[in-house]
Image (cartoon, coloured by chain):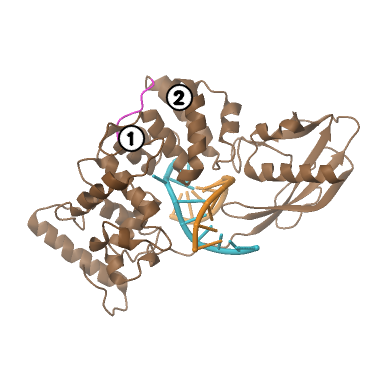
Chain colours: A brown, B orange, C cyan
DNA sequence: TAAGCGTGGGA
DNA sequence: TTCCCAAGCTT
């Protein structure tokens, strides 16, 4: 593999290499996919490694064996969107026990499903999961479409998931590109263009090394490699079956790929959560269907803004007391500092909306993590007043 | 198109 | 503690 020389503009060099390899491939009549993996050596080496080292996962058939039930493949792929394997495992077990197929999931109660998803994050996935199950049950005779295009039309199924399910469940050749594959490919070919601009190039490169045979195993092998060997920090190149083909390894700084454009800082916001308790029950509300934590059960909260809102947005007029204890929680694009407001009332007030929930069973309410965290803090406050 | 959307683990 | 990151999708 070409070693990087003293060059003021890596992207120019990269393009030159790209062009030469393209010409070479074209002249051999191999493929128009660029650059090519001349004899499929990368896929062969990777699958050989996968046959020995594949992770054992509840939603995965062992290498070279018939595919797992498409329902489980699909469910696992949705849960795994932006979520790590260890986090998904207990949720996958819970869901497949309670809802073992499309028919049972399609018949699930919305609130039950949202509560079961609580803590896993990205709650739009849960709403789309239900919509998808009902579409499959109602319009596809309970069977997932077998093609990438058919899958892509389902709610919550984007480019990655459609390709992954087609390849893993139905043995269709599909180019599966997730964050692992992006990292592996960007290192293999020393892609200098930063993400996300490099996505089309990386997809083309991934296409060039994807085999016709065993596409599902190949996709999972790429992801296993990315998760266990070709990690974001401190990659274990000495254990990598592809190090002989890896431009980033040759260059000596594989951990610096993929290049990325810097992310903007996360702003700080402030909010207040309200805990009003009467007769051993606390007032909970349901958040609007769309937007942050959409459709989830929650504690009443005022606005989240740059300055502490204090008691603005209180659910009822009462004698509120703001605790010294604060909760901090990080969301994807902002950080939240939460003040805790409590009211002790003798008579249960009338409220426009919401439900009174037994405090002793608050764990079963299916609260998103930020509210569960606050509920625990309120519990500690109450005990020590 | 770029921003909005959760959470927990690891360094 | 803080930051980065992860089997992305939707609008």
Residue A178, magenta (yes or no): no
Q: What chain is tagged by disc 2?
A: A
- Residue at 47% of width from left, 47% of height from top? A84
Estimate how packed mark 1 is, as few (under 14), some (14 to 19) or many (20 or more) residues with alpha carbons within 10 Å: some
Q: Quadrant of the C terminus of chain A?
A: top right
Give the extent of the magenta segment: A142-149
Residue A133, how many percent across, how many down?
45, 26
Secondary structure character of the magenta stretch overall: loop
Evaluate whether residue A313 shows in this view. Answer: no
Circle 2 residue = A100
Total number of numbered discs in the rendering: 2
Residue A140, how many percent across, how many down?
37, 22
**Alpha carbon of mark 1 to alpha carbon of mark 2: how far?**
17 Å
Q: What chain is tagged by disc 1?
A: A
Which residue is more in the foreground, A319 or A87?
Answer: A87
Q: Quadrant of the N terminus of chain A?
A: bottom left
In the picture, residue A195 is in which quadrant? bottom left
Circle 1 residue = A61
**Would you say A314 lies left or right of A189 here?**
right
Residue placed furthest toward the left: A28
- Residue at 40% of width from left, 31% of height from top? A72
Evaluate whether residue A325 shows in this view. Answer: yes
**Would you say A176 lies left or right of A36 here?**
right
Q: Secondary structure at mark 2?
A: loop
């Amino acid at each position: 593999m070409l070693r990087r020389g003293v060059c003021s503009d890596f992207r120019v060099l990269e393009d030159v290499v790209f062009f030469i390899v393209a010409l070479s491939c074209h002249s051999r009549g191999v493929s128009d996919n660029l650059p090519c993996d001349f004899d499929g050596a990368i896929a062969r080496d990777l699958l050989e490694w996968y046959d020995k080292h594949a992770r054992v996962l509840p939603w995965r058939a062992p290498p070279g064996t018939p595919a797992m039930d498409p329902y489980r493949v699909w469910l696992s792929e949705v849960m795994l969107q932006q979520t790590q394997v260890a986090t998904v495992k207990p949720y996958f077990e819970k869901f497949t026990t309670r809802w073992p197929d499309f028919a049972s999931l399609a018949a699930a109660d919305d609130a039950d499903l949202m509560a079961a998803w609580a803590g896993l994050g990205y709650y739009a996935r849960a709403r789309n999961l239900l919509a998808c199950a009902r579409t499959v049950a109602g319009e596809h005779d309970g069977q997932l479409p077998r093609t990438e295009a058919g899958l892509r039309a389902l709610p919550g199924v984007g480019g990655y998931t459609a390709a992954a399910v087609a390849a893993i469940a139905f043995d269709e050749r599909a180019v599966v590109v997730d964050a692992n594959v992006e990292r592996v490919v960007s290192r293999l070919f020393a892609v200098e263009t930063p993400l996300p601009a490099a996505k089309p190039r990386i997809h083309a490169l991934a296409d060039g090394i994807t085999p016709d045979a065993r596409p599902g195993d190949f996709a999972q092998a790429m992801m296993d490699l990315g998760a266990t060997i070709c990690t974001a920090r401190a990659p274990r190149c000495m254990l990598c079956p592809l190090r002989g083909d890896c431009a980033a390894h040759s260059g000596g700084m594989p951990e610096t790929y993929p290049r990325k454009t810097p992310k903007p800082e996360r702003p700080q916001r402030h909010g207040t959560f309200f805990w009003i308790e009467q007769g051993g029950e606390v007032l909970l509300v349901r958040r609007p269907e769309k937007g942050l934590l959409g459709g989830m059960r929650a504690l009443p909260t005022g606005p989240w803004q740059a300055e502490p809102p204090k008691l603005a947005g209180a659910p009822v007029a009462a004698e509120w007391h703001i605790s010294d204890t604060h909760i901090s929680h990080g969301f994807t694009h902002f950080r939240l500092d939460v003040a805790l407001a409590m009211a002790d009332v003798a008579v249960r007030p009338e409220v426009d909306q919401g439900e009174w929930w037994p405090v002793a069973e608050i764990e079963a309410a299916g609260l998103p993590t930020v509210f569960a965290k606050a509920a625990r803090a309120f519990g500690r406050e109450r005990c020590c007043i």
